[in-house]
Image (cartoon, grey):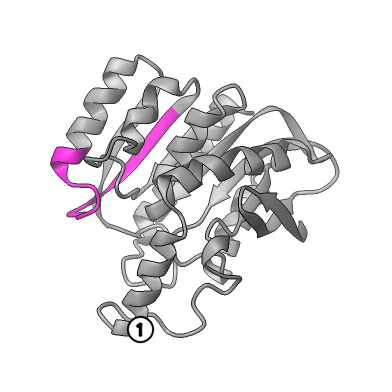
Amino acid sequence: MIEQKIAIAAADGVAEAVFYSPGGGKFPGVLYLTDLFGIRPATEGMGKRVAAAGYTVLMPNVFYRGGTLPLFDFEFKMGEERSMQRVGALFGALTGAMMEKDAPHYVDALLARDDVKGPTIAVVGYCFTGAMALRTAAVAPEKVAAAASFHGGRLVTEEDDSPHSRIPHVKGELYFGHAIEDQSATPAQIAKLDDTIKGWGGAFQSEMYEGARHGWTVPGREPYNEKQAERHYEKLFDLLKRTIG
C-alpha cells in the first residue's frame, strides 16, 4: 500500500490531502469525501480499505477553509457549547457553492495522477459530504462515472441550490444509502429525492439501511453498525466495479 500526503490547490486555498494506492500500476480513481469530523484514523482506515480493493484513493480535507488537520483537537461532545461552535464553523466553511467550486479541483488532481486509470472517476461522500458527492457528479459530469452518498444529510432543502436540484446535470450512476430516523434526511426529503431521480431517468439506487442510524459506517463512534457498515462496502464496491472497473 502506497500512502502519500500532499497539498491540493483548491478554489480558495490549499487543501491537505492523502493518497492511497495499491502500487505497481494504474488503478481506477476514487474521490473519498469524509464526514464533518474530517480526516482521522477512522476515515484513513476506510480509505485504505477502498484502495486495497484495487483503487487509487484521494481523501482531501474538504473543510480546509475551516482549518488544518485535525479538525477537532479536543473530544467532541454532542450539545457541548465548544463542540457545537466547532460544528457550526465547519458547516460555514463548506457551503453548497463552495463544494461546487472545489469539486473540479479534486477531480482533476485525482485524474492527473500517474497511478490513476481514467478517463473517469467515482466519488463517495458520507454524512455532510453526501451532498458534495452529488454536486461533484453534477459539476464534472464527463469525468464522474458514479457518485455514492451514505447517510447523507441535507440532500433536499428549500434553498434554490438544493443538492437534489443538481441531479439533471449528472451523467454518472447514483447511489444513496439512507439511515433510519435521520433528521437530516427525513422520509419526506428522501421521497422528494427519489421522485427527482426517477424523473431524471439515469441509473440509480436509493435504499434504507435497516437499523442503521446516521453515521453508521464510521468505526469509533456510537452510531457505528458493523453489519450495515459491511453492507455499505459491498454496495460501494459493486458500484465501483460496475462503473469504473
> Can residue 146 be seen in this snapshot?
no
Percent of width and height locating residue 173:
46, 25
Percent of width and height locating residue 66:
51, 66
> Can residue 219 be seen in this snapshot?
yes
**Label 1 neighbour load within 10 Å: few <14, some 14-19, many 20+:** few
Where is mark 1, residue-wise? 82
Q: Nearer the viewer, residue 26 or 147?
A: 147
Stretch in magenta: 174-189
Q: Nearer the viewer, residue 7 or 179?
A: 7
Note whether 85 is above or below 54 in the view shown: below
Q: Quadrant of the C terminus?
A: top right
Percent of width and height locating residue 143:
62, 27
Q: Nearer the viewer, residue 123 or 228?
A: 123
At horizontal 23% and vertical 47% (from top left) the residue drawn is 185
Q: Residue furthest left?
A: 188
41 relative to 178 in the view: left or right = right
The local secondary structure at tag 1 comes to helix
161 relative to 123 in the view: left or right = left
Percent of width and height locating residue 28:
69, 35
Amino acid residing under circle 1: Arg
Note whether 27 is above or below 138 in the view shown: below
Quadrant assignment, res 166: top left
